Image: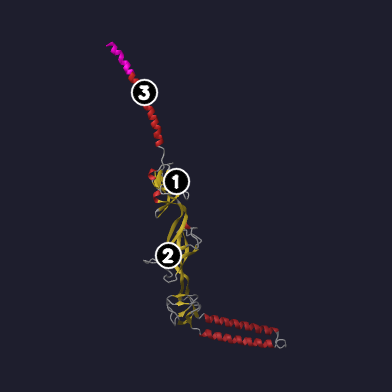
């Protein structure tokens, strides 16, 4: 029994030594395998699809209600009082500049013209007679000067009589269309009486209000579109011709006026219109909708810088069909990730499988 007791510890020591040798061997193998594992786990470029960033102007559409007037418009009044003897027009007629539309009784004025003409001829004959005797001493220079002045006065009297006669004929001041009139032959009129209206509606002037926010962004010569409120009304094009010099302090708007062609005579002065005006308000990066991501600190995109991605903050400015204008530090021509965004992290290597 004693000898058996002594051998047991020796056997145990041999087992411990063997166990330690195996442990060291395994440790060496694990160390070798670990190095290979690190080599095998080297970063691999992630496949993604990207698109190139383009910069585009932000489009802003102003819509307003505009009121129109004719290019030229006037209410016709007589210069003098008198009785109407002839009305030569009907409502809607087109007249030419200088065409007579109403005549007043002008018998006295015609007689006045004839009298003035006779007086002028008499003055001329007397002056010519004095001229022929000039230098003979029969007529003095003062008498000759008086005769010459009489000729000038007679000529002025004739001109004034002709003007008075012209006032008896009321004429169109420009080409246009005539409006409705309440004047008939036999009516008594005076300078306060409205005979009719004349409108040159070959073009219309459409006035509308623009918010003061856009002051300085609209310029003369810009194109606009106008349409009537009728269903199916076609749009008409126009051009800005006038911009008011001040802002209305009550409405915080300023007036703008556009010239609209009316070649087919479909529009009428006084009509109201839907006015549309497109403006450009700055330039911004344009990105696809799918490129915009959201995080705890707001929206961002994954931009490709070389072969690595970087997270770039972005703020939505305007949505356009299939894309978004953003305010962001995205240079034009930079690529942004559109597919594979879920696997992205800062500094990750990527490869574009779309070949863009």
Q: Earlier in the sequence, mark 2 or mark 1?
A: 2
Q: How many numbered circles are shown?
A: 3
In the depicted view, which residue is nearer to us: 306 or 265? 306
Q: Main secondary structure of the magenta part?
A: helix
| Residues in magenta, as a range | 1-13
Q: Which of labels 2 and 1 is toward the front?
A: 1
Res. 304 mark? 1
> Alpha carbon of mark 2 to alpha carbon of mark 1: how far?
45 Å
Give the answer, above or below, for where 311 lies relative to 192.
Answer: above
Could you tell me how far apart the alpha carbons at marks 3 and 1 are, in whole angstroms? Answer: 52 Å
Q: Report x, y in % for residue 28.
A: 39, 27
Q: Secondary structure at mark 2?
A: strand
**In this rendering, is residue 44 above or below 260?**
above
* Quadrant of res 89: bottom left
Question: Dot 1: few (<14), some (14–19), or many (≥20) neighbours within 10 Å?
Answer: many
First along the sequence among labels 3 and 1: 3
Mark seen at residue 183: none
Residue at horizontal 59 percent and vertical 87 percent from the top: 118
Task: Check disc 3: other Cα within 10 Å, few if <14, some if 14-19, many if 20+.
Answer: few
Question: Which residue is painted at 64% across and 82% down in the image?
Answer: 149
Local packing at callout 2 (Cα closer than 10 Å; few below 14, some 14-19, many 20+) is many
Q: Position of residue 22 (x, y in %)?
A: 35, 24
Of mark 2 and mark 3, the one earlier in the sequence is: 3
Q: Which residue is mark 2?
A: 226
Q: Nearer the viewer, residue 348 or 286?
A: 348
Question: Is residue 250 among the parts visible in the rendering?
Answer: no
- Given residues 155 and 232, the one toward you in this image is 232
- Mark 3 highlights which residue? 21
> SS of the residue at dot 1?
strand
């Amino acid at each position: 029994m004693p000898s058996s007791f002594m051998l047991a510890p020796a056997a145990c020591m041999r087992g411990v030594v063997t166990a330690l040798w195996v442990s060291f061997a395994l440790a060496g193998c694990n160390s070798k395998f670990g190095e290979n594992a690190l080599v095998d786990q080297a970063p691999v470029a992630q496949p993604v699809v990207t698109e190139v960033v383009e910069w585009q102007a932000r489009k802003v559409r102003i819509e307003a209600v505009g009121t129109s007037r004719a290019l030229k418009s006037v209410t016709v009044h007589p210069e003098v009082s008198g009785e109407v003897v002839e009305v030569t027009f009907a409502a809607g007629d087109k007249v030419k500049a200088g065409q007579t539309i109403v005549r007043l009784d002008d018998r006295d004025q015609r007689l006045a013209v004839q009298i003035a003409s006779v007086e002028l001829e008499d003055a001329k004959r007397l002056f010519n007679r004095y001229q022929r005797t000039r230098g003979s001493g029969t007529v003095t220079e003062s008498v000759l000067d008086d005769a010459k002045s009489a000729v000038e006065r007679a000529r002025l009297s004739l001109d004034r009589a002709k003007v008075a006669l012209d006032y008896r004929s009321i004429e169109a001041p420009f080409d246009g269309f005539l409006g409705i009139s309440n004047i008939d032959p036999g009516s008594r009129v005076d300078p306060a009486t409205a005979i009719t209206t004349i409108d040159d509606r070959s073009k219309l002037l459409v006035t509308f209000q623009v918010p003061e926010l856009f002051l300085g962004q609209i310029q003369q010569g810009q194109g606009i579109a106008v349409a009537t409120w009728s269903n199916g009304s076609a749009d008409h094009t126009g051009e800005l011709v006038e911009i008011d010099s001040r802002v209305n302090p009550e409405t915080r708007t300023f007036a703008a006026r556009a010239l609209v062609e009316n070649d087919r005579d479909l529009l009428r002065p006084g009509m109201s219109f839907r006015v549309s005006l497109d403006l450009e308000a700055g330039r911004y990066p344009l990105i696809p909708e799918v490129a915009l991501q959201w995080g705890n600190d707001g929206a961002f995109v994954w931009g490709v810088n070389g072969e690595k991605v970087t997270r770039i903050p972005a703020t939505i400015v305007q949505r356009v069909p299939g894309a978004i204008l953003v305010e962001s530090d995205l240079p034009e021509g930079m690529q942004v990730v559109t597919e594979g965004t879920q696997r992205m992290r800062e500094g990750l290597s990527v490869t574009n499988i779309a070949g863009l």
